[in-house]
Image (tube, rainbow, N blue to C red):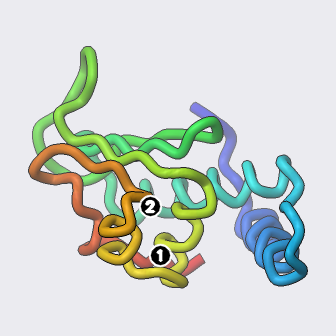
Amino acid sequence: MARKIEIVDGRAALGAVRDAEAAGTKPARAELATAVRYLLQLLDEKAPGNSVEVRVPPFGAVQVIQGPRHTRGTPPNVVEMDAATWIAVATGAEAWADAATAGRIHASGTRADLTGVLPLRP
């Protein structure tokens, strides 16, 4: 299992990503990776389970939401998005429905809507 990201480190990375975006610059890759992984960690803590796989390539993936356990091959419930979209929907800066409608979230499966567990409170 990956090492746990401490709250102070996760919040600092999120702050750095927000500051970079506000300045119109690209966030540092290490800070972006930490912010994404921190939010995935919070999602796992809030909605533990194995029925939905949330992917934010190339930074991380986590299986969450109670339900049928998936063990082999492609999971039946998959959510995938880029880092900027994940940070926006996970923090509440953008509504899940808006990002999905805009085509920035690719979700398949009957349990692949994370509206009930987002936004997180980092």
Residue 56: x and y in percent read: 53, 45
Kindly state the secondary structure of the residue where label 2 is placed: helix
Label 1 environment density (alpha carbons within 10 Å; few <14, some 14–19, many ≥20): some
Farthest top residue in view? 72
The image quadrant that residue 52 belongs to is: top left
Looking at the image, residue 56 sits to the left or right of residue 31; the answer is left
Q: Nearer the viewer, residue 41 or 13?
A: 13
Looking at the image, residue 122 sits to the left or right of residue 46; the answer is right
Name which residue lies at 15% across and 45% down: 109
Name which residue lies at 57% across and 31% down: 1
Residue 50: x and y in percent read: 26, 40
Relative to 16, is 64 above or below? above
Do the numbered discs 1 and 2 sit on residues whose CB atoms are within 8 Å? yes
Q: Nearer the viewer, residue 63 or 75?
A: 75
Q: Nearer the viewer, residue 3 or 25?
A: 25
Name which residue lies at 70% across and 60% down: 35
Q: For the residue marked with disc 2, what is the amino acid?
A: Leu
- For disc 1, the marked residue is 120
Circle nearer the N terminus (1, 2)? 2
Label 2 environment density (alpha carbons within 10 Å; few <14, some 14–19, many ≥20): many
Farthest front residue in view? 102
The Cα atoms of the two marked residues, 1 and 2, are separated by 7 Å
Residue 116: x and y in percent read: 24, 74
Q: For the residue marked with disc 1, what is the amino acid?
A: Leu
Looking at the image, residue 118 sits to the left or right of residue 23; the answer is left
Q: Which mark is residue 43?
A: 2
